[in-house]
Amino acid sequence: MSAAKPYKRSWKNLLINKKYQLRFTLFMVGISTLLMLGLGWWVMRVANETTMVAVGSVWGTRCPEVPAMLDVPEQTLPPAEPPAVPMQLDEPGKPAPPPPPPAEPASDEASAAAGSADEPAADAPPRRATITMGDSSLTLVKTVKKMPPDFGVKIVAYWTCKLRQAGKLEALEHGRLRILWVLIGTGLVLVLGLALYGLKMTHKVAGPLFKVSLYFAKMRDGRFDKVWNLRKGDQLVDFYEHFKTAHAGVVTMQKDDLARIAEVIAAAEAAGLGEHPSIVALRELQLKKENAIE
Amino acid sequence: MSSDPSAASTAPAAGRPKYKRKLSNYLLDKKLQLRYVLLVTILSGLIAGALGYMIYQQKRAAFESLERDMAELTQGTTNPGAFDDTLESLESEDRALVYKMVGVGVGLVVILSLYLLVMTHKVAGPLYKVSMYFDKMAVGKLGKVTPLRQGDMLQDFYASFHEMHDAVRARAQAEVDTLDGALVKLREAKNQADYRGEAQSKLDDALDNLEKHVAQRKQHLA
């Protein structure tokens, strides 16, 4: 491992201790999901209630009523054309156009002018269909429907109000749906983000454990290589320091053994016991130990 | 990670009393445990707080809408007291909701923190125990390793440590036997040959040193 080139974490190696990492990550994700689902359901229930109250409030707002058509006897029907109804709806910030002046009742002159040769004269009394049945009589008066004076203005006001209500209802429904989508979106982002973060966070614990496990395997096989430092950002730094002292302790133990063995071999050789089977065995042990700490 | 190693370790499996976790020992590795506990607790608190605020906001909007409508409806009525009563009841309902949410939030944070503390302790415990063995190994002590407590995590990691420790211990034991045997045989050979002079005194010193060394090793392996 080169000191100049720092170790780069790879996504492929993120899950190195499945049991530990998944347990902690899934717990974190599970708690968040439960909270999001439980409280999200509560939020939606309250949002539905609020929308219902607001919808009730909108429906409860009274719109100006549409005036009923007036029944007018036929002869009083005004000949004049109905007044022009302003079709421009209210715009925010602009004052409403003044209502048109109410239609003037038909004047006598107009009525006279409207008369034709077939019709009776203007000053003639109106014709009535009269049915006589014995002592009583019933007079049938022909009537026509007539618009009240401010009919157009009131119709416009009525439909303006209705359209406003529809707009408000639509806005309320949009608001309700927006809350739902925001909750779903936030929940998904949270769960995915937490899953990734959880894996990365637990990897910083699982990484050092994995590294120590590799050294364990080497030590088990009688190899006491140099122990390298942890990667930047790894956790369990204190634990790793304990491991390093343990490893160093075992290496020291090997070195102490080697020193004692070398001393005995040297003394035995000086005393002419160099080829003694015990010295041969000690040389083998010495070689093994030297290889182990290389 | 410091204090009495025996506190976290267990006696041999057969016949030993069941280890009882102590509340005071739950925070073994503050950095590791508090990091996870705080992360999950703060996150849960934030989610609960944000959604709780949304619930309150919606409730408040409904309340205000109702208040407006009722004010319009009761305009000019002879009994405004009924309106006030209804408003008061709605307001107390709102307050109760806030208290309920705060209570649930605090309860959630407390229960979650305690549970996470126990959960992380099951990771910190084995690490603490292994650290104690590491400290012993650092001074050459290779005593017997006892199993983890029931419910502890990192069982695989502990098993690999156990395996390594046993292998190192077995090797050390074999080496001590070899050295012990060599010591006996070399003393016999020295006595049979009846060496004299400097060579013998050097060999005597070397064998004495080896004997002390082997005795120490035996003591550490006990």
Image (cartoon, coloured by chain):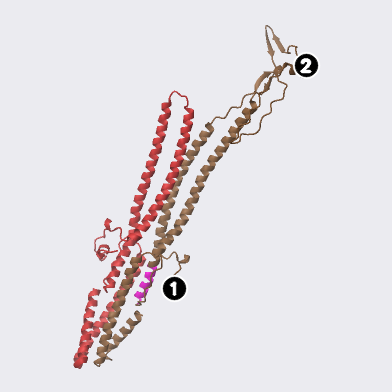
Chain colours: A brown, B red
Which quadrant of the rendered structure holds the C terminus of chain B?
bottom left
State the SS at label 2.
loop
- Residue situated in front as seen by the camera: B168 or A211: A211
Residue tagged 1:
A4
Magenta part, dominant SS: helix
Q: Is residue A32 visible?
A: yes
From the viewer's perspective, tell me whether residue B71 is left or right of residue B186: right
Q: Residue at x 55, y 38 (%)?
A: A169
From the viewer's perspective, tell me whether residue B183 is left or right of residue B77: left
Where is residue A25 shown, x and y percent of the image? 42, 58
Residue tagged 2:
A119
Tell me if residue B210 is in the magenta stretch.
no
Q: CA distance from mark 1 to mark 2?
A: 116 Å
Q: Which mark is residue B146?
A: none
- Which of disc 2 and disc 1 is earlier in sequence? 1
Q: Which residues are magenta?
A: A209-221
Figure check: A207 above or below B45? below
